[in-house]
Image: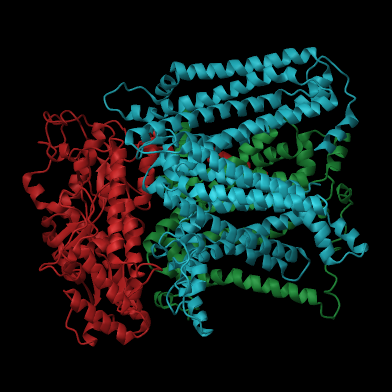
Amino acid sequence: MASQTTPLAPPTAGKASADDGRNGPRFDMGQILTYAVLLTGAVVAIVPFFYTVSVSLMNLTEATGGAWLPRAPQWGNYEQAWRDASFSLYFMNSVKITLITVIGELVFCTLAAYAFARMEFPGKAFLFALLLSTLMLPEAVTWVPNFITVSWLGRIGPIPWINNWPALTIPFMAGAFGIFLLRQFFQQIPNELWDSAQIDGAGHLRYLVRVMLPLSKAPVMTLALFAFIGSWNSLAWPILVTSTPDWRPISYGLLAFLDEAGAQFHLQMAGSIITIAPILIIYFFTQKQFIEGIATSGLKG
Amino acid sequence: MSTTAVGKQVRTVTPARSNIFAGRQGRKLREALLAYLFLFPAFLIIGLFGLFPLLFAAYQSTLVGLNRIVGRYDGLNNYVRAIDNLTYVLFFWLAALLVFMALRSIMQARRTAQEKQWAFWIWAPSGAIIGAGFILFVLFIFRALPAVLEVPQLMRARGGPQASFQQLLAQALAAPPIQQALWGALLFIVAGIALHWYIARRRSPRDRLHNATGVFTGAAVMLLSAAYLLWLTWTEIQRAYSEALEAGEGLDIWSQIITISAGFLLLFVAWQLWDSASHRQSNAGTALRLGAAAALLASAWFLIGELPRAIAAGDDTWWYGLLATLYYSMGTIPIQLGVALLLATLLFQDIWGKSVFRIIYFVPYIAPFVGTAAVFRIIFSSRPSAPVNAFLRSVGADPLAWLNEPAGIFQLMLGDALTLPAWAAGPSLALVVIIIYGTWSFVGFNTVIFLAGLGSIPRELYEAASIDGGGRWAQFRHITLPLLSPTIYFLTLYSVIGTFKAFNHIYVLRTAAALGTTDTASVVIFQTFKRDTRYGYASALAILLLLIILALTAVNNRLASKRVFYG
Amino acid sequence: MRHKHLWMMVLLSSVVLLMAACAAPATAPAAEAPAAEAPAAEAPAAEGPCAPATEGEWAGVDPSGQTVIWWHNHTGSRDEQLTALLAQFDECGITVVSQSQGGYDEIRDKVNASIAAGEQPAALIAGYQNDQAFYQLNDALVDLNTLIDDPKWGLTPEDKADFYASFFDQGVHPAFGGQRLGFPPNRSMEMIYYNQTWLEELGFDGPPTTPDEFREMACAAAEAKGDGSGGFILRDDASAVAAWTLAFGGDILNEEGTSYVYNSQATIDAMTWLKGMYDDGCAFFFTEGYPNTEFAARNAIFAMGSSSGIPFYATDIQTIAEQEGRDPDEWGVAAVPHTTPDPVQNVYGGDVMIVKTTPEQELAAWLFIKWFTTPEIQAEWVRISGYFPTRAGTAEFLGDYINENVQWGQALALLPYGSYEPQLISYQATRDAATQAFNEIMQGADIQTTIDALTGSANEMQEELMAEVE
């Protein structure tokens, strides 16, 4: 089967492998089917979300009465949610926490994943199994030991961890999920590249940075996205390790707000939409990166 | 990885110096050191925030006490409370498995060494000593934990010496048993490595390169752990017997261990026979299959007869939690992965509007579950006027209670015609709604990873295939699937782990009216830990769940090892 | 090569951010440990209200100049107004910093984790009575009896008598040698909300007092609505189960207050009666959220819930009426329909507790509690929160508030009939079990069997937990 991985050719023009049916005037059954499936799926995926948006624009009567659409969109709900949830207070905290976490996670996971995928060392299988086993412990029992750890690290180390950025970011800078994900993709990259890189005299680090990373843009970006979402939406841990607003994330604002909004669905939904808007926007503008194929990246550089 | 090794031979031209980093062996050492360097930051963090909680939970699962981090030692009683006498069977088999794995790794390495005529047994002493060192280090951690965890109590004690945290910590760690374990561990590891070097210097470079110290280290660690587990099980069984004797009750742990073990062994034999039957000719194959069926029947007889009796006094909430977890997992994974693969394949084509579709499919995953769960509550409300019930009424069906319905779906389908026992009634309708929610929200996650996987398949392969005249299905079957297999493997494994641990949305969607039928194992653990603050019992449950996931992962790996293809 | 720039950008911004992050802690720790500040600049006066006592358990402890942190469960505008109220506190140079932690559950998790790690929780924390038991397992709380009875810092006999006895003594724990671990700053009560306008349209004069009247009215409303809603919104919470049992003349605690009695005749009668209402379509479940919006939208004539919901009901009724272009319905709150001669009302609410820190902090925290529960300040807190005061003397400061908030006044009048729920250590878990049992009964389970099983398992759990306490 190894013969299937042909050495890579230079990038070919754009949509060489594109579907061939679109240009002709004839009906392509396959394409009709494709669209039928995609549209059905899209409807199922979007309806609950669409309903969320719809409720977020209703007034109290409509939200209670079970209407599907607001008669007149109440944009003021968003203003009220933004104000009442003190989002402006927590927004920058979330941005900072998330960026620190994502960058750390990308660097540390890439290095570790590369070691697991492309290097030989004693205890590799054992360490990998150990890594996976950390994924398997239910989170509920990890909170207290991890709280102890961050509290004590803060006491031993130079800066406090509780109520500060280290407790919110460092524990998430490396995780089995990220290492495992990247390892899988790194392993997929043909061995021939390593051989030729070695002939060029490249070491592991240079090979990783110059060859592996450009080829793995999609998985790395995917990991960045999931790290971003995970950090942005995390709630239980940030509440546990912060007691002042200084480093509290936006999800705390949402929780406190949901509690206060009580039965007012429309405000709850408006608050929820505000918190996910940044993720949606980022994903919208970067989504091309997630699937950029191997052939378009090439081997130069 | 064999190709990598072959590839490296191209460059064995470095002149041999006395430098230990030179030569082929030197390069191997250099690579290993560099790999450890790459791993260091990640493992520092994972060690602190992933492995430490694991050890902590293992330690705490032997303690009992309310809201106590360091409770009273209670042996395996937390496990017995959860799964009754099956505990002893489980721990006995864990030990047996470790022995088996240790012996197998030694045997395999020995066979290879014999074939290639490398030295083998000479590495045993150094490996054993290093392994013992590692075990001593674990012992150090388990001895240090209670002492160190008492420090907060000492600090809060009024009127005592007002020592600082660092001082108290140092005092706690200075206790002789802890120090002995620590220095013993370091001594053993250093001595083992020194012995290894001493031997290695006297052997040929070829033997040095293919030394078996690592194999023996692993085997020693496994054997010593097995010995500890056996000792623990043994003493705990003795304790249970003496307690039963005092209470004037009868106990038959030993017979249960034997019967249940025999049952599982026969199950294993049946599987092996069946597996080998598929490679044989018709007659031999039939005979093997018959044998397998017989073994299966016998094992079923043993297990059905004994298991219910052995777990009778266990925690019902826990067993139902596991059953709900199983339902949730089986209900979500196949659909979630199948749909995601289909969508990703379709979206990977160059079609109009693909970026819009990609965003739409991803929305359920990123939308905060507090919002979407509330929407699901409204859509699947038990009110007759709620969306789904309104639809049912319009097609002439009766409205259902959905999230408030504790009855199993098979029971609901049968109606009143027949009353099924609890275990056969299937997941409750409420759990089914949660399964729908889980599938709905995680399809996007899987789709994005599949898309990344598809992106890593060289397009030239498809071009070559279309020149060869391969149809779309053939391309999918012969290019996409095999090259996507690492991604599929990853997602399967991750989904198994994820669904067994799933918590947030299940917790948010549970209603009191569902009568606990939606409480999965992770919900039970959460309640035990947070609401009841029975840390020891919750940790024991968490370890049991971990063992189950571990077993499933092992099975998954076995199945996948034949099918995953790395380029 | 555009992606190269992208990576550069990411790298650059990361460096900038990391630097920013590293620079930040210089300011952050200010909020971290304000606890043990040195006493304020002025030397402690030998005389005066803030001078250390010369006798008693707290002799020589100088509370002046302390900064006390309070972890509470109030959020949003209530949190803001509470902070403003605390600014008025000006005794002995003590500063109280209020820090919202979300809810009671979050506070509980934080305190438990902090105790385990040796991290100092806030000196003042809010929480329920059964939380107190859990904290005290680690000897984390101050016994307030020493402070209340202190000759210099304690309460006067008149003060003590002014507190409603049942609230005042709720924080006393027989399981911990009669220690007083919590102090009640406020309370709320399980109530029936009724729609007066609708009742009158149906030909009734006013709210029901007996179960029979209640049933008649709910059924009439349900019949008028005709779609399965309209009657009474059932509440499956354990507090509601307790409230019905009390109203039917029973109790869910035995007389010594040491174990549960969920299977008394009162509970059986109450459950039978509620199940009958449910089966006849006069009561229904609404499980998607709080019932106030349903009540305001005239989907139910009766709802049940805590009196602390009164402000929310008021707003919702006003808003929905405005949006529907009609006059707001007249509504009110009443006692839970009872078979007893007088109402028996379930009253509940969180306490404040003092966590063991330094004696100075503890004393300062107590001085704050003392101030916060004076009638004047309680009255202000009532206006902010809608809770009930815990002492009779508050009433004189609330005359105008009662006039403006009719429903709140109605509820306050019922305070003398208050009774309370168990504070046994297992009550957190038992609450869940009671809620589930209520649902089982409404789904058709046999009442006697179900509540017998509930009583059995709840007492078993209580014994089990008490065994682990020892």
Q: How many marks?
A: 0
The answer to whether B21 is drawn above or below residue C401 in the figure is above
Q: Nearer the viewer, residue B150 or A201?
A: B150
Residue B301 x %, y %: 56, 50
Res C227 → quadrant: bottom left
Res C69 → quadrant: top left
Q: Is residue C459 left or right of residue C207?
A: right
Q: Is residue A249 left or right of residue C364?
A: right
Q: Nearer the viewer, residue C383 or A127?
A: A127
The answer to whether B397 is drawn above or below residue C45 in the figure is below
Taking the view exactly as shown, the residue that stands out farthest to the left is C158
Which one of the lettered chains is coloured cyan? B
| Residue C442 shows in the view | yes
The residue at 41%/59% (across/down) is A257
The residue at 70%/19% (across/down) is B124
How was this image coloured? by chain
Q: Nearer the viewer, residue B12 or B311?
A: B311
| Residue A160 shows in the view | no
* Quadrant position of the C terminus of chain A in the picture: top right
Q: Is residue C169 left or right of residue C316?
A: left
Q: Is residue B148 left or right of residue C424?
A: right
Residue A280 x %, y %: 60, 61
Which one of the lettered chains is coloured green? A
Residue A34 x %, y %: 74, 72
Which one of the lettered chains is coloured red? C
Residue C42 x %, y %: 22, 31
Taking the view exactly as shown, the residue that stands out farthest to the right is B468
The residue at 88%/23% (across/down) is B14
